[in-house]
Image (cartoon, rainbow, N blue to C red):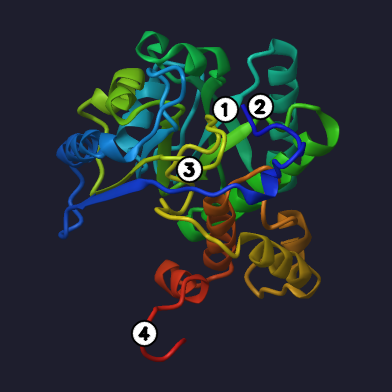
Amino acid sequence: MYAPKRQGLYDPANEHDACGVGFVVNLDGHKTHDIIKKGIEVLKNLLHRGGTGADADTGDGAGLLFELPERFFREECAGSDINLPDDQPFGVGMCFLPSDKKLSERCVELGLTAAREEGLTLAGWREVPVDADVLGETARREMPDIRQCFICSRNPDKAQLELKLYLMRKNWQKLVREQISCSDTFYIASFSCQTIVYKGLMQATQVSGFYSDLRDKRVESALAVVHQRYSTNTFPSWQLAQPFRCLAHNGEINTIKGNRLNMEAREANLYSERIGENIAKILPVIEPNGSDSSALDNVLELLTAAGREMHHGAVMLIPQGWGGKY
């Protein structure tokens, strides 16, 4: 459910977030299921940082971002018609599709179009196993059709595949906005060959019960970023739950309108040697109907896609509060 249209004293342009975040990591880079378990434990301990509505069992949103568990997905897909290459990287899209079957099928068709334009193969779809009974009434009513798509490439370069996935996702979203009136019910939570996001309109204590994948010991990672949302003046939705694709953000950006307009003004002059002539595919950089945190995530994603290290992009977007500004 997105915010209502502008009316009276309410203006959706004033949407902000204020939430709780956590981070767990194995410093040696070793992937284990224990990191997922600890991430869930941290998330549950952030319950006090979240909010609920009149439906006390529906939270403002919660979730986890962690490394793509390749072994888990290869084994899950082995018994299906999804053929993943043994010696090549692959991407996974965590997709929230419309509950309307015809709209969902049209979104899938446009995904195939976007894949072909990038020279990628959409290998197939997996129904994400979920337990809707753990959700509150509002969350169940608004719940999308949650599916994962698997994207393959002939290029073994993981960095190049990540860039292609970024371009494909941005183009896919644009096609849906332009051709189908369901842009408020179609959302891609993550689309990467490196990371994946499991999130939704729920409380921190409900996430692992809702997604059974998170309890599977084959799901391993060396890091986990977790987020429990508290929307001070936003309308909660499945899409606005965090983490986003690059970050989990705690706080409010009071200059959000100025930042959005400044980014929009820069779009005509955007240039990247790495992205090249494909730069038009990623516009608009900031996706419509998002929150302040999602807008920040959109721009950080652009900077990393263009070749900057993520910490470099973060410092560009959020300068330190002391010393010299870089």
- Residue at label 4? 322
Observer-side mark, 1 or 2, equals: 2
Residue underneath mark 1: 96
Asked if the residues shown at circle 1 and circle 2 are in contact, with their CB atoms under 8 angstroms apart, the answer is yes
Q: Marks 1 and 4: which is nearer the front?
A: 4
Is label 4 or label 3 in front?
3
In space, the residues marked 4 and 3 are separated at their CA atoms by 28 Å
Q: Amino acid at mark 3?
A: Thr
Compared with 264, 44 (above or below) is above
Q: Amino acid at mark 4?
A: Trp
Q: Are marks 4 and 2 in contact (CB under 8 Å)?
A: no
Q: What amino acid is found at the position of numbered circle 1 in the picture?
A: Phe
Helix, strand, or loop for circle 4?
loop
Q: Is residue 201 visible to the viewer in this orientation of the structure?
A: yes
Q: At x 56% / y 47%, what residue is drawn?
A: 154
**Nearest to N terminus: mark 4 or mark 3:** 3
> Label 3, label 2: how many angstroms apart (C-alpha)?
23 Å
Q: Which residue is mark 2?
A: 185
Residue 187 screen position, x and y as percent:
61, 34
Q: Which residue is mark 3?
A: 232
Q: Secondary structure at mark 3?
A: loop
Q: Which amino acid, mark 2?
A: Thr
